[in-house]
Amino acid sequence: MTPPLPLNPAQREAVEHPGGPLLVLAGAGSGKTRVLTARIAHLITALHVAPQRIFAVTFTNKAAGEMRTRIGQLLGADPRGLWIGTFHSLSARLLRREAPLLGFGSNFTIYDSDDSEALVKRLLEARQLSTKVYPPRSVHGVISSAKNRMLTPEELGAQLDTPLIKVAADVYAALGPALKQANAMDFDDLLLHPLTLFREHPERLAYWQDRFQHVLVDEFQDTNAAQYLLVKHLARQHGNLCVVGDDDQAIYGWRGADVRHMLTFQNDFPGTKLVRLEQNYRSTQIILDAANGIIAENTARLGKTLFTEKKGGAPVTLLSSADERDEAEWLANEFARRAADGEAEYEGMAVLYRTNAQSRPLEEAFRFRGIPYRLIGAISFYERREVKDLLAYLRLIANPADDEAFLRVVNVPRRGIGDASLAVLGRAAAAWQKPLLEAARRAGSVSDLRPNVREGLSGVAALLDRLREAVGQADPATALETILATTSYEQYLADEGADGMERIENVRELVAGAAAWAEVQDAEAAEGTGTPVERYLTQAALITPVDEDQNEPGVTLLTAHMELAEPSRFLDALPPEVVEERSTTPSWKPLRGSGAMPPRPSRPRGAAARRLPPDVGFPEDVSQDAPRYVKGERVRHRKFGGGIVRAVSGEGRDLRVSVDFDDPDIGTKQLLVAYAGLERDWEGEGA
DNA sequence: ATCCTGCAATTTTTT
DNA sequence: ATTGCAGGAT
């Protein structure tokens, strides 16, 4: 057993709080993870609370895993039975046991947003509504936000009378039954179904209330109404609810999170103990002065002031640069210098940006300088086509009613079953009130289908029967191997050529990952929550790019999300004495206040201003995301190879370049910069 | 009817 | 980069 974590008085107060409502106001870098970890360990060792009677919510699965490991280190043994995870994964786990009471099988599928949007699209089409006028994505967005606010379809429809809302309410009303028919739940349902269960089955609520003696929530400022209600329910009897958050760091307002929960908590739970963690262990006083200056702009906050023992420190540099490449090069240069001077290691450096698209210039600059970096949260492994295909097979084995999985799998590999045939099958399934897979099994009795399609469909049904038989209770890696062997999926990929080989690599990686998962995973098995494949699928559905391991050491690149939508305001809030202004181009000076900048009244401030060109020659409102290109410049395309920019047109997101590629077979191509993924051609430049 | 090719449109942020 | 769609070949 490792010695207990050292704690400062405020941290200790939070950790040792004996019970009852506890609100921990934790500033950035104040050791809140340490407090949560230590508190859970304290509950188990000092208060003798059994791990399985603790319900702890973290913001990501990765955080849950790390916290679990650290608790294990403190205890000297894995906290077996501890419920720790995101709201979604904990809810899914609870629902696996309660699904039958809600009219679902415990083998229900979790639909991701692609699945949900595809289902919405089919529901729109069934209503003869144009998916051009009502994009499934928008419609689903409206429905999802209604769910997050816990509105019924009727309540949504009564809200506003715009056509989109009306259509969304209409589709929303059909969505619930469709999901139930498919034995599927979407992300929002994972939060809502437990509430329905508690409402309709008070005895189950009583069970879970008794089961969990302590409830803890991290990143409380980012909880939405349904999430808060869930933990309120669980903790209502004993009041042992510990929430940790920072009202100055709320970032998920756009997805229904409500910071005001921080403010209402003390009213909701009278007698709440409030602990402020104000000592920061990460940054120098100068950095904190900058942060405090910005935070002070927030209104309606509980209020806290960060302090640190690290006095002084280097000032914050406010850099203005010509464009994002220029900026990236400056950063790469600066990082390389600091690493060479021994000021800091690459592992201790990070770049935050607003959108993932902005990582590209940084990656280029870092690669050019040979600086190691790791990219967090760009594209998920699980979003790859080949991975989704195989998981869809697995889903369909686990849950034969999963229509979205069926539609993904039915013609992969090619079986000569196209949209027209699927439309016919869909009508038959609807008439029979059966899942598509079941309808496929009876394709022989659908007269509108051509003989070869009938054969194809009943072949798919038979294939799935065989797979289900063969997979049985096997672990996910074995199940995946079985699917691969039975469908010749790898051959199908190999036939796609060079791209296919890369996909085969990913397939192997998926199988290896599934095997590794099975090794680690056994804590939940004791509770008997479904087959290994079902548990694997739950986990796979809820994994996010940030959860995925990137073992590469180096500078960390990741997004900073929203709070910076209006950068100018915040820049102006920086206390001037802690800021050093610099520019990549000596000839041009950026300004926060008065000074060398000519008085242009309409000049945008903040980030936009920082990106203004050093001289004339470029339009003022260029995209913040896309790199800029110049005629005559050499570029490199992943597929087409090297070439020369001949013309540039459009602006912002529509910025297009005309490129003469070196390969005469390719010739000149028009490319949309934002998506083409062009890079500067370093090799060609010198030559 | 299905498959193939080439072109257009699409991305904030996450479960 | 990837997906969706239109138009043509099979």
Image (spheres, coloured by chain):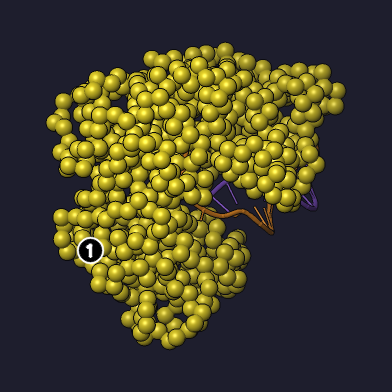
Chain colours: A yellow, B orange, C purple
| Image quarter in which the N terminus of chain A is found | top left
| Residue A348 seen anywhere in this rendered image of the structure | yes
Q: Quadrant of residue A369?
A: bottom left
Horizontal and vertical percent position of residue A431 = 80, 23
> In the drawing, does residue A472 fall left or right of residue A336?
right
Which sits in the foreground, A302 or A581?
A: A302
Which sits in the foreground, A112 or A477?
A: A112
> In the drawing, does residue A281 fall left or right of residue A439?
left
Horizontal and vertical percent position of residue A493 = 56, 36
Mark 1, other Cα within 10 Å: few <14 / some 14–19 / many ≥20: many
Residue at position x 75%, y 31% in the image = A422
| Residue A482 seen anywhere in this rendered image of the structure | no
Horizontal and vertical percent position of residue A43 = 26, 26
Name which residue type carries label 1. Answer: Ile
Residue that numbered label 1 is attached to: A286
**Residue A489 to residue A472: above or below:** below
